[in-house]
Image: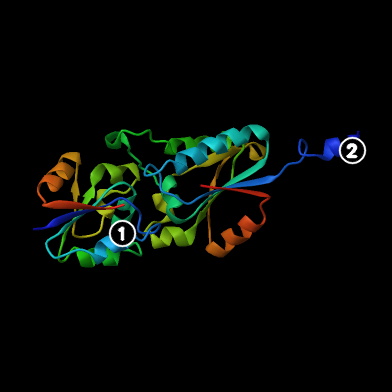
Amino acid sequence: MNDGKATNGAAGAKKRFMYVNRKAPYGTIYALESLEVVLISAAFEQDVSLAFLDDGVYQLTKGQNTTAIGMKNFSPTFKALGDYEIKKLYVEKESLDERGLAPEDLMQITYEDEDEDYAEKPLIHIVSRSELTEILARQDVLFNF
Amino acid sequence: MPTLHTINKSPFERSSFASALNHLLPGDALLMIEDGVVGARKSSAFAGRLEAAAKTCRVYVLGPDLAARGIAEKDVVAGATLVDYGGFVDLVTGHDRTQAWL
């Protein structure tokens, strides 16, 4: 009916999707469910980023050992996000501070930048609360976990 | 007749942790489990309240839940004792009642 509309419609549009993570892992299922949806979304070639604030920052702590609680430690999965073209993980600095955490307490997560001779670059960006507020405001779609 | 208080929610997410602290009697025991262990991290905004409670009550943290969240033993507030699941059971049987602050 309208070829122009079809090509410019939802199928061709690239949107900014942000996954907002505010819960600690393991106590509830939110963190794992978010990661599952993020991985699914990677198949749709959208501009995907993740935000970690409040207790969500605990999803990225290094040294997680879930052996004794009998649950799967899914934190290593975050290290695969770069391979799915998901390269922006924003962590709110104030949330770390309030919890006695420092950036050094988080996992080292990198991706290989194919545009720069596969240089290893960090996926995690520590941002202030006001910076994160602005990043949120730039998104087309927000998914909240 | 001491009471065991268990807390399984982060103090940063719910008011139940604060409610637990507000209802502790001297000699009671407080046990942090599940997301409640987030409150045991030293130098957090909540640590001062927990350290104050530890002066009149016994404070325990479930080690397996700390480990799952990447919180090292050395990073737990002063005055808190780590227990395993066996220690959890001992605390329950060693008190007259358990108040679970869900």
Structural crowding at the residue carrying mark 2, measured as other residues with C-alpha within 10 Å and reported as few (<14), some (14–19) or many (≥20): few
Where B33 sits versus B45, above or below? above
Residue A82 screen position, x and y as percent: 57, 37
Whether residue A50 sits left or right of residue B3 in the image: it is right
Does A114 appear above or below B5? above
Q: Which x, y percent locates residue A6? A: 84, 35
- Between A69 and B73, the one lying in front of the other is A69
Residue under the point 35% across and 34% down: A71
Q: Amino acid at mark 2?
A: Gly
Q: In the rendered image of this protein, does residue B66 appear above or below residue B78? A: above
Quadrant of the rendered image containing residue A119? top right
Chain identity of mark 2 = A
Tell me if B1 is positioned left or right of B13 in this view: left
Amino acid type for the residue under numbered disc 1: Phe
Reading the image, the residue beneath label 2 is A4
Q: Could you give the CA–CA distance between mark 1 and mark 2, rounded to whole angstroms?
A: 57 Å
Residues A103 and A112: in front is A103
Chain at tag 1: B
Residue at 11%, 51% in the rendered image: B95
Question: Which residue bears the numbered disc 1?
Answer: B17
- Across and down, in percent, residue A5 comes to 86, 39
For discs 1 and 2, the disc positioned in front in the rendered view: 1
Q: Secondary structure at mark 1?
A: helix
Under circle 2, the secondary element is helix
Graded by Cα atoms within 10 Å as few (under 14), some (14 to 19) or many (20 or more), the crowding at tag 1 reads many
Q: Pinpoint residue B32: horizontal percent, then vertical percent.
A: 26, 52
Do the residues under discs 1 and 2 have CB atoms within 8 angstroms?
A: no
**Residue at figure coordinates x 61%, y 56% from the top left:** A136
Colour scheme in the image?
rainbow
**In the picture, which quadrant includes the N terminus of chain A?**
top right
